[in-house]
Amino acid sequence: MSEKAEKIKQLFNDYVVPSYGRFDLVLDHAQGSYVWDADGKRYLDMGSGIAVCSLGHAHPELAETLAQQARKLIHISNLYYHEGQGRLAQEIVSRVGEGKCFFANSGGEANEGLYKLARKFGNETGRYEVITALHSFHGRTLAGIAATGQDKVKKGFDPVVEGFKYIPYNDLKAAEAAIGPKTAAILIEGIQGEGGITPADPVYLAGLRKLCTERNILLLMDEVQCGYYRSGSFCSFQEILKDTADGKSFLPDAFSMAKGIAGGFPMGAFWVRKPYADLLGPGTHATTFGGTPLACAVARKVLEVIERDHLAENVRKVGAVIKNAVTEMAVRYPNVIEKSRGMGFMQGFSLNMESSVFKRSSATPSVQFVNALTENGMLAIPAGASVVRLLPPLNLSAQETEEALTIIEKTAKEFNKG
Ligand SMILES: *Cc1c(COP(=O)(O)O)cnc(C)c1O
């Protein structure tokens, strides 16, 4: 690392709360699917800022929209109406089903809205409990870490917010058994992200829907990472269920969004189904920055470009190419890659945890592999100790895909050799 980059790192050491485990990389600028570090080295970005930069970096139309809207109206608060928020809500509703949207600023905050919705829904009957899945991730707010089915995010932050309970994912019987007199909702990710790229199976989703309807509890979904076309459909449940009998009729009662929603501009949101859409009445929920004219303008442009450039199709097609190629690599390098996981552009692969090739360092296999990919010119993101995530921009080209696969293979080969 150059002196210039070291100096930037030193600023973090001196002045920034050290709550993140950061890679040893100082990034400076980006274009499309590529980012450059402070020393001028280029990387293919297969992480998109954790599934955020859905149109890649420095997209000219997003940049232009930001500049134009900034000159017209950045922020007015939610004391007033403005066209952008109404139109964006309409756009989202048209892609899902009858309902309404609330706008926030992050995934954690969007999920907070879901917990409040569940509590408001159950309040009159004394129900407040939200059942979530083991290995889930729902954000780092106090209720978010309570909702998250992983102990590591809760450590040191007792007492945990009350009213959350965990079940194994993709286990319908466990869900049924967990519902009690205090249960107001079940919340799951359509595809678990941080937990290691695990899609819900279609039978599980359809079963949960039926169960929640029968027991009069809300089915909530966290689409923060897997939503917004990352799966190949607008919502992951649409993609997961598309070839099933429930595909057309399935809807959760509410779901959260964030990450890719505004292509890198901070925004979160939730959609809530018609009979519950007015549960959170005036004065019950609010946020100063939610759905600003600026955020809404960018988010609408993101949807426009995705639609115009047929990016959902690109995600489905290229996602299958990546999946097949990684599956073949797992056969060629079983010492390194265990198997491919995921769907669309929420891809990943698990590493062989037993293999001696990962015993040479104390870092987790996922971090070792991601570090080696970085060395070879590509960014990817670990999920837990064993999984490497690929969350490329939705407009990743065929040529960039080839480049990514070449780098993954080269890296696997290097580990294999030792
Ligand atoms: C990232 C993420 C969150 C939290 O979003 P923030 O914007 O970091 O608050 C919540 N749920 C899921 C599934 C996520 O991937």
Image (cartoon, helix red, strand yellow):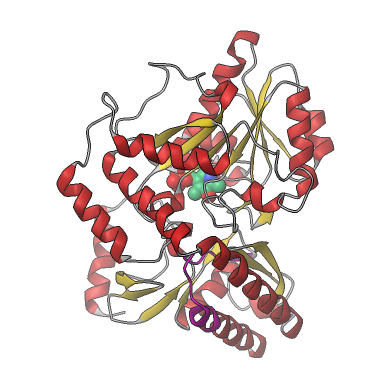
Query: Who is closer to the viewer here, 239 or 119?
Result: 239
Q: Vertical placement of 76 versus 335: above or below?
A: above
Query: Is any atom of residue 365 visible in this view?
Result: no
Relative side of 200 to 397, left or right: right
Relative side of 393 to 388, left or right: left
Q: Is residue 52 magenta?
A: no
Residue 32 horizontal/vertical position (percent): 37, 71
Which quadrant of the figure has residue 10?
bottom left
Residue 259 horizontal/vertical position (percent): 45, 51
Residue 62 horizontal/vertical position (percent): 31, 58
Q: Is residue 389 magenta?
A: yes
Which quadrant of the figure has residue 176?
top right
The residue located at (47%, 20%) in the rendering is: 280
- The quadrant of the image that shows the N terminus is bottom left
Residue 258 horizontal/vertical position (percent): 46, 46
Which quadrant of the figure has residue 357?
bottom right
Marks counted in the figure total 0
Query: Is any atom of residue 84 visible in this view?
Result: yes
The residue located at (56%, 73%) in the rendering is: 368
- Residue at the far top: name it: 124
Query: Who is closer to the viewer here, 118 or 411?
Result: 118
The residue located at (39%, 36%) in the rendering is: 104
The residue located at (38%, 16%) in the rendering is: 283
Tell me where the magenta segment starts and ends, as one range: 387-402
